[in-house]
Amino acid sequence: MNVRPMHPKRLAASLCAAGLLLAAGAAQAADPIGRAGIQAQYEQDVAACKSGSTGQERTACMREAGAARQEANRQHLSDGTAEQHRQNMLNRCNRLPAASRQDCITQMTSPTQVRGSVQGGGVLRETVIQVPAAGMPPPPPAPGMAPAPGTAPAPGMAPAPGMAPPPPAPMRQ
C-alpha cells in the first residue's frame, strides 16, 4: 500500500475545516431563539391563512403571520406576565373618557360570560354591574382610578371640563 505523508499545512487546513463544520453543527443545534420553531409556527400560520380558518382577510392574515415571525426572530414576541396584562388593561381603560373608566375596569376584571366567536360574526361579553340602592354611598374607586361617573368631586375641586351640569333653561313668562 502506497501512503504519502501529508504536508503539515494541508493537515492543519483539513483539521481547521473539520472543526468549523463541527462548530457550525453545534451552533445550529443550540439555536438560542429556536429559529426552526419560529419558522414552523410561521408555516402553520400561513397554512391557516390560506385555508381561511382564521376568520381574517387573507392579506391581513399573511401580514400578521409575517409580522409575528419577524418579532419572534427579534425576540420581542412573548405572551407576557399576569402583571403586564393587568398594566395593559389599566392603560387601555385610562385612555377612555373619565365617565367610562370605572365601567371599563369593572368589565375587564369582573367575571364575564362570553358567547359567540369572531369567526361567527361577533363575541358578546356580558358583565353584570350592581348599582347601589338610592341613598347608599357609592363604593370607593379602584386605586389609581378616577371616581365613578355621577359622583361629586372632592371638596374644593371643580368638575372636569365638560362634566359640569348644564345651566338651567331660561323660563318664559
Image (cartoon, rainbow, N blue to C red):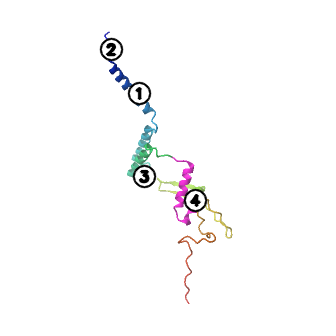
Using a 10 Å C-alpha cutoff, classify the residue at mark 4 as few (fewer than 14 neighbours), some (14 to 19) or many (20 or more). some
Residue 24 versus residue 43: which sits nearer the camera? Answer: 24
Looking at numbered disc 3 in the image, what kind of residue is underneath it?
A: Gln
Which residue does the numbered mark 3 point to in the structure image? 56
Q: Is residue 92 magenta?
A: yes
The image quadrant that residue 27 belongs to is top left
Disc with the residue nearer the chain's start (1 vs 2): 2
Looking at numbered disc 1 in the image, what kind of residue is underneath it?
A: Leu
Alpha carbon separation for disc pair 4 and 2:
81 Å
Which residue does the numbered mark 2 point to in the structure image? 5
Q: Compared with residue 32, is residue 155 higher up or lower down, i.e. above or below? A: below
Picture quarter with the C terminus: bottom right
Q: Position of residue 71 (x, y in %)?
A: 43, 46
Disc with the residue nearer the chain's start (4 vs 3): 3
Looking at numbered disc 4 in the image, what kind of residue is underneath it?
A: Ile
Q: From the viewer's perspective, is the residue at label 1 or at label 4 nearer?
A: 1
Disc with the residue nearer the chain's start (1 vs 3): 1
Task: Residue at 35% x, 20% y: name it.
Answer: 11
Residue 29 versus residue 136: which sits nearer the camera? Answer: 29
Alpha carbon separation for disc pair 1 and 2:
25 Å
Looking at numbered disc 2 in the image, what kind of residue is underneath it?
A: Pro
Q: Compared with residue 11, is residue 41 higher up or lower down, i.e. above or below? A: below
Using a 10 Å C-alpha cutoff, classify the residue at mark 2 as few (fewer than 14 neighbours), some (14 to 19) or many (20 or more). few
Considering the numbered disc 3 on the image, is that residue within a helix, a strand or a loop?
loop
Q: Exactly how many numbered labels are in the figure?
A: 4
Q: Which mark is residue 22?
A: 1
Q: In the shown orientation, is residue 102 left or right of residue 118?
A: right
Task: Residue at 43% x, 44% y: name it.
Answer: 74
- Magenta residue span: 79-105
